């Protein structure tokens, strides 16, 4: 990983993760208390994840109003 980060273009792209992706997962884990899936099978997990993301997005939408 250290050799990848030494490259010029890779460091700036990796730094963007802190701004875009990582906070969302942190908020879902910490604020929503979502640590593990309750259901089994990939289809049920996909549905559960969709509900978690929908709830997260609706909460942020309501807070923005």
Image (spheres, helix red, strand yellow):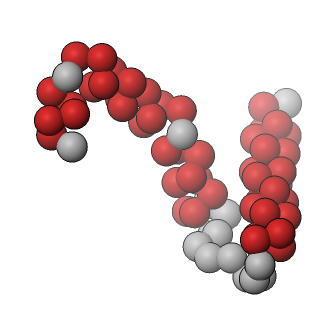
Q: Which residue is located at x 84 percent, y 45 percent?
A: 58
* 28 displayed left or right of 5: right
* 4 displayed left or right of 22: left
**Quadrant housing residue 4:** top left
**Quadrant housing residue 57:** top right
* 2 displayed left or right of 22: left
Question: Is residue 50 or residue 19 the one in the foreground?
Answer: 50
Q: Compared to 30, does 15 lie above or below?
A: above
How many numbered marks are there?
Answer: 0
Q: Tell me residue 63's x, y (percent).
A: 78, 39
Q: Compared to 34, does 6 lie above or below?
A: above
Q: Which residue is located at x 67 percent, y 63 percent?
A: 32
* 36 displayed left or right of 46: left
Question: Is residue 33 or residue 6 the one in the foreground?
Answer: 6
- Is the C terminus in the top left, top right, bottom left or bottom right quadrant? top right
Q: Which residue is located at x 52 percent, y 54 percent?
A: 26
- Is the N terminus in the top left, top right, bottom left or bottom right quadrant? top left
Could one spot residue 59 in this view of the protein? no
**Residue pushed farthest top?**
8
Q: Tell me residue 41's x, y (percent).
A: 77, 78
Question: Is residue 59 or residue 11 the one in the foreground?
Answer: 11
Q: Tell me residue 2's x, y (percent).
A: 15, 40
Q: Which residue is located at x 15 percent, y 27 percent?
A: 6
Q: Tell me residue 11's x, y (percent).
A: 28, 25
């Amino acid at each position: 990983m250290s050799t990848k980060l030494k490259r010029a273009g890779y460091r700036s792209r990796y730094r963007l993760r802190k701004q875009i992706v990582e906070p969302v997962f942190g908020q879902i884990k910490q604020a929503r208390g979502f640590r593990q899936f309750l259901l089994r099978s990939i289809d049920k997990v996909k549905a559960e994840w969709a509900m978690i993301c929908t709830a997260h997005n609706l909460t942020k939408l309501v807070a923005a109003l």
